[in-house]
Image: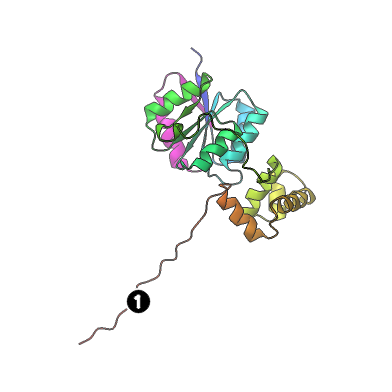
Amino acid sequence: MKRITVLLADDHLVVREGLRALLKSESDIEVVGEARDGRRAVQLTKALLPDVVVMDIAMPLLNGLEATRQILKAVPATRVLILSAHSDDEYVEQTAAMGAAGYLIKQTSADLLARAIREVHAGKTVFSPPISTRLFDRRQRSPEGVPRLSSREMEVLQLIAEGKANKQAAAEMGISIKTVEKHRQSVMSKLNIHDTAGLTRYAIATGVIESTIKLTIESPRRTQRTR
């Protein structure tokens, strides 16, 4: 019996290890690779040609949304199953628009995950019960009046929002600095946003990256004792 080959894409090592351990007991499923960011997930999918990619959304360098789009364009036979802590309508709709075959929340049981992998491999669509009714028969299109960015522009937007300079973005994407600058100007023009802070806010609001809130822990103030 031919096993269903699976690639795990999640930026947390403990999650990948847990998923691998859970799927190891399934005789018809084989984990063939792991990726800690979306760009690596795209590269490994092209190299390994897995049947199913289990994809997180929030990952560095390239988020799961854009990674899904690139994977399905490069290797259309591969099925992408989203496994995320987020269950917001916006995330679900975006992944469906990208062509993902299913969407599970991370509270999903091991048994349901294995069944979902089998289902999407068989050509079916699978969603966690809490979100399934919000997706079926919904038209997959961009909201009216919202500009559509190209795949490269989405990559540049994410890297800008992650604080990467043009030189760093060029190195990550394997393109020239001039090309990055061209994409950057195009993104700003399409979105009518002309500063990095604005692009970062847009990226967070649309789910391109997660908001990182830094907490400052202050030492408790000493109070004077009264005698």
Q: Could you say where residue 197 lies in the image, as x and y percent from the top left?
A: 63, 60
Q: Could you say where residue 114 lies in the image, as x and y percent from the top left?
A: 43, 25
Q: Could you tell whether 203 is left or right of 21 in the image?
A: right
Residue 87 in the image: above or below residue 169: above
Which secondary structure lies at badge 1?
loop
- Magenta stretch? 10-33
Image point 61% across, 43% down: which residue?
A: 62
Q: Can residue 163 be seen in the rendering of this structure? A: no
Image-quadrant location for residue 219: bottom left
User: What kind of colouring is applied to the model shown?
Assistant: rainbow
- Residue at the front extreme of this rendering: 144
Image-quadrant location for residue 26: top left
Residue where numbered disc 1 is placed: 221
Q: Could you say where residue 193 lies in the image, as x and y percent from the top left?
A: 68, 57
Residue 110 in the image: above or below residue 182: above
Q: Could you tell whether 180 is left or right of 225 in the image?
A: right
Image point 32% across, 78% down: which residue?
A: 222
- Residue at the top extreme of this rendering: 1
Q: Could you tell whether 156 is left or right of 88 in the image?
A: right
Image-quadrant location for residue 130: top left
What kind of residue is marked 1?
Answer: Arg
Residue 222 in the image: above or below residue 57: below
